[in-house]
Image: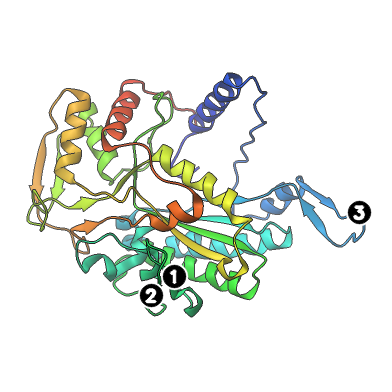
Amino acid sequence: MSNSYDSAFVNIQRLAKKHWASKGVACPRLRLHKIDYRSHMMRTILGRYTVQDAVLSSIRLSHITGVIHFAAYKSIEESTQKPLDYYQNNLAGLIDLLVVLGDFGIQNFVFSSSATVYGSVLSKGCKPVREEQLIHHEAEAVSHDVDGQATTAAVPGATGLTSPYGRTKYFSEAVLADVALADPTWRITALRYFNPVGCEPSGRLGEDPRQKPTNLFPVVSQVLKGDRPSLDIFGTDWDTCDGTAVRDYIHVVDLARGHLAALAAAGSRPAEHAFRAYNLGTGEGSTVAQVVSCMEKAASRSVPVRQTGRRTGDVGFCVAATERAERELGWKTRLTLDDCAADTWRCIRSPVEHTA
């Protein structure tokens, strides 16, 4: 695993067993297959969950009811240094995976997308961004606002995508939208993450990457652990309440619930929505300074900061409009920024030993 450890799977198993035991039910078997998802071994693994149709032997029926695709590189900075790695893994790998899944009749597909696909839309003001502001086909152009009134969205396409990472997410969505348009028996859901943060509340499962983190919460965590001397705050002159940038921070537990809701709702979606995008965020923004304050409160210690200039491509405000997900998925967030900070600090105080 390129950016995680086997201990993550071990702790998922422990938490799953605890969850099912509390319900008096045996835990389903969890399996970890350590392979490159682009390899031919994928067909072998999927074949283990497949049977031949009793009537038409040429048709294979899979016991797999859906796939959630997370396997992508995600560092904006690294993507500018290694663009071909990002296009090969994030985009070419996705295409190969779709071909394999199609061959096995697995057509309920949830894709890990990102708010970065909105590009220049994010620089046009301080209003939450709506899914209709980034579409791939004219069929998506008519949607409904919070009151159920029909609205017309922008024309297909995006501008202002400032990194290879962002472009791989946009192009991946475009590929998925094309697949669904050509074959509406697919149900493809693109979940546009805003800023996932926090840890599983027990403290046993948190963000612990192999690679050098660049996101706010893991960097603050490293400062609190003494692994970094200070936190760099990029830009203190944004048009916000304290001059630091505003982001929509969503707890990873709420994010996980969003994936379950997407899988469950896909089967009842009409053919004209064979491809559908949803924002996963809270609908509320917090500044970098407010995040630091929350972490200081949770840890009862200060976080040294260093104020620096804005980074190229940064925006001052990025918050999700969440009405579509609430209306169509029956999902909304439950946890707060204080919950994110408290759970992160609990995870810091409960370090997990790594296995390879």
Provide the residue designation for mark 3: 54
Provide the residue designation for mark 2: 153
Q: Secondary structure at mark 3?
A: loop
Of callouts 2 and 1, the N-terminal one = 1
Provide the residue designation for mark 1: 143
Location of residue 105 in the rendering, given as x and y in whole percent from the top left corner: 73, 59
Location of residue 177 in the rendering, given as x and y in whole percent from the top left corner: 53, 70
Mark 3 → mark 1, Cα distance in angstroms: 42 Å
- Residue drawn at (73%, 62%) of the image: 103
Q: Secondary structure at mark 2?
A: loop
Mark 2 → mark 3, Cα distance in angstroms: 46 Å
Residue 351, disc: none
In terms of depth relative to the viewer, which is nearer, 217 or 340? 340
In contact (CB < 8 Å): disc 2 and disc 1 = yes
Q: Nearer the viewer, mark 2 or mark 1?
A: 1
Tell me if mark 1 has few (under 14), some (14-19) or many (20+) residues whose alpha carbon lies within 10 angstroms of its own. Answer: some
Q: Amino acid at mark 1?
A: Ser
- Residue drawn at (58%, 71%) of the image: 272
